[in-house]
Image: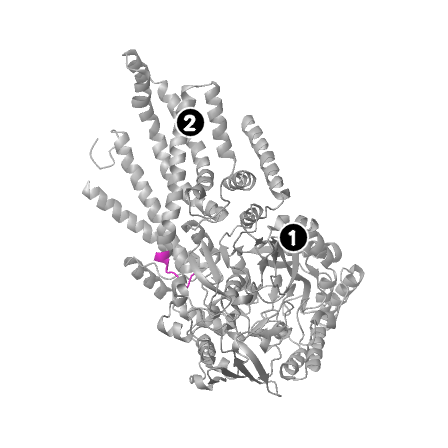
Amino acid sequence: MKRCTRWASVLTVLTLIALLAAGVAAPAVSAPARQVLRLNLETGEPPTLDPPKIDNRAAGTIAKQLFEGLTRLDKDGNVIPGVAERWQVSTDGKVYTFVLRRNARWSNGEPVTAQDFVYSYIRTLGSRFGAPLVDNLFFIANAEEFNKGKITDQAQVAIKATDDYTLEIRLHTPAPFFLKLLPFFSVLPVSQKADQQNPRWMNEAATFVSNGPFRLTQWVHEQRIVLERNPTYWARDRVKLDGIEFTMVANPSTAYQNFQAGQLDMTRPPAELTGRLLAEKKAMVFPEARTFFVRFNNKAAPFTNASIRKAFSFAINREAIARRILQGGQIPLRGFIPHGLSSGTGDFRKQASDLYNDNDAAKARELLQTGLKELGLSALPELTMRTSNREIFTKIAQAVQAQWKQTLRAQVAIEVMEHRAFVAAVRAKTYVVAPFSTGADYDDAFNLVTQFTTDDFFNFTNYSNPEYDRLIRAAAVETNAQRRTQFMIDAEKVLIQRDMGIAPLYTNTQVVLQNPKLKGVYRYAVAEDDYRDAFFEP
Amino acid sequence: MGAYLVRRLLTSILTLWVIITLTFVLMHAIPGDPFISEARVSPQALDNLRRFYGLDQPLPVQYVRYLANLARLDLGRSIRSEVRNINQMIADGLPISALLGAEALILAVVGGVTLGVLAALGHNRLLDHVSIGLAIVGISVPSFILATLLITIFAVKLGILPVSTWGTWQHTVMPAFALGLAPLAYLARLTRSSMLEELGQDYVKAAIARGLSRWRVILGHALRNALLPVVTVLGPITAGILTGSFIIENIFGIPGIGKIFVLSISDRDYPLILSGAVVYSVLLLLTNFLVDAAYGVIDPRIRVLGKTR
């Protein structure tokens, strides 16, 4: 037994040495002669590559390289022409007329027509189709009614091809972000002809038809996906990569080792190494338009009281959570809308600025006493915080639990649940307080603010303030961009400054390890990466 | 013999049915469903998805439907993949997992028995210490640590093996070793002790006294008897390798069935969870049957075939 223990300790030391050695080794970099970008799909085999059926970013990133929507985003996130060469917006902001380029082709050589877009959107809206992010099309007049089966005549959905290369889309309310929504994976087009000839065209590389910078040439299930430059793409001359290869390694440590061994050009480092790699400037960090926050159930005591909610929010030290605990470059957030998300007239966060000071123990204690008095309580009851078993959530839960205990003497127990069970509990509103996150699908703050209106299906916080509802309704129909921004800024003030309906924590980030020779990758706080202009320096 | 086989088959089917039913009840008892996520998916879209996958039907209907399909050997459609049905996923993944499992099992049995016999023969000498030292390493190092260590040394540092994924024989070396080392160590220790016990028996001494060659006695008599406990544990060891492959396939990014089934649980991919239970149960029932049959071959005193002793 003694011998056994000695062996075990020797081995433990050896293992640690090996792991440390692995960590400090410089990445072996070898740019292949052919320009092939080698990436990994952490989430494994994508369930589908049929754009409207996709519900996750990994598959969405592949679809983005394979397909092209009416518009694209440039490297700064501005709208540029995609399949649509130019467009006109009516003065009431509701009617969009797109003129499609005549040299846009599907990978089978057929032209991309306005009818393909009509077909694609009607297909997505079909109630039996099961498109998870179908809501992104609900800005189109009658689209939601058609999806719900209230309208059965598809001609009533306000999207029509006036000729082969002219597409007209009418919205029910103006949506200034509509052009930015069009490159999103869930609204990318499919070929009508290919889909009608073979409804299972998307399942194998041999039958796959797409219209983007790359085409699918190999799909070995659970192993790899290979894309090649699409010879029929209208801007094929500007595509510098010969191809993109995706492997499917779900384990982040293995993916990191692949990167170290020079077998991947880009990956996300494992959580335990993130802080160090960032400090050593070996990894890069990019903001992601996703807010991590603490949900208070506004209908569960003691969080029915705004003073108590504020006390809990002011007691949190966001800087410490980001810097010392998560170490992934997260940006402390003192408002609801994350950094990097547009208001329609600029960066929302910069325009709205910070809405409170946190880590303010004195103010937090004072507010706690006020709140307790208002509730007629002498002390805080014991509370239970439900959380997901995903590492990021348990870390957040433990951090705020400790800070609340220290500052407010609050006794908060943590109940860790399996992730989906946790999300189900939050959706069912069977929680008192819980960490959560919410991210934008397209680059406009409006995408996130609706979820705290009283009747929104996504309002799992039970937050309700008629003033907030009024401001969001006003923003929804406002055609003047400045006024619209102001409505949303005012609404956020009601939600956070006045009511503290939730306690925002930080803007999330993406930490990336990248082959230093790889250039021209476009990353966005909202959308998926774009590799159309990527290349390797010699 | 025929009657025994039929009885064995019937009890196996019954066992399988119990497993399926329990899995069905348990997986639906876990809160959450396949489409629940943090994303802003509307109740309408959720309803559409549930209808699309037939999850809007009452549970008894889903249960009966699954059993009926299973009787036709149709495992249904995975929610995780729009692209392939489950039969196809298993057809793609099973040969890979089977190859990996077989390599690990052969490594464990051949290596373990050899090491155990050598240790017993060189009892308390260098060979014994080396063998047992190796065995202790194998038992005390968890497979995922071993896997990381192997990757670091052989793939990253030395660059002689690929880090991960699948395709050539080089891809199988590290995973098979990581998967097979623990059972190898266990078998070595087991073989050593049962071999030592047999070597001290009177019949061995008598055989040697009768002038039979030492190797003939060791391999023909002692080893044969010493292997009996080894065969007994082959069933559990195969089970261990099958379930161990869950972790190893994940670490090495191997497209086997272990990886698929592990993900199926967190994904709440109901049809795939059930199929995982079915496939692994069939494999284990089969292994147990083979182990029982092997008893009869190795030890004529044991007659599982129902004859009176």
Instruction: Give the color scheme: rainbow, by chain, secondary structure or one colour.
Output: one colour
Where is residue A484 drawn, in percent x and y?
Answer: 68, 80
How many discs appear?
A: 2
Identity of the residue drawn at 39% across and 59% down: B271
Badge 2 element: helix
Check residue B135 in the rendering and tell me which mark sits there, or answer none: none
Judged left or right of residue A484, residue A183 is left
- Quarter holding the N terminus of chain B? top left
Q: Nearer the viewer, mark 2 or mark 1?
A: 1
Q: Main secondary structure of the magenta part?
A: loop
Where is residue A219 drawn, in percent x and y?
Answer: 43, 58
Q: CA distance from mark 2 to mark 1?
A: 46 Å
Graded by Cα atoms within 10 Å as few (under 14), some (14 to 19) or many (20 or more), the crowding at tag 1 reads: some
Identity of the residue drawn at 65% across and 84% down: A479
Tell me the residue that label 1 is attached to. Answer: A283
- Point out the stretch of residues depicted in magenta: B81-88
Judged left or right of residue B280, residue A120 is right
A308 vs A343, nearest the viewer: A343
Q: Write down the chain letter for disc 2.
A: B
Judged left or right of residue A184, residue B1 is left
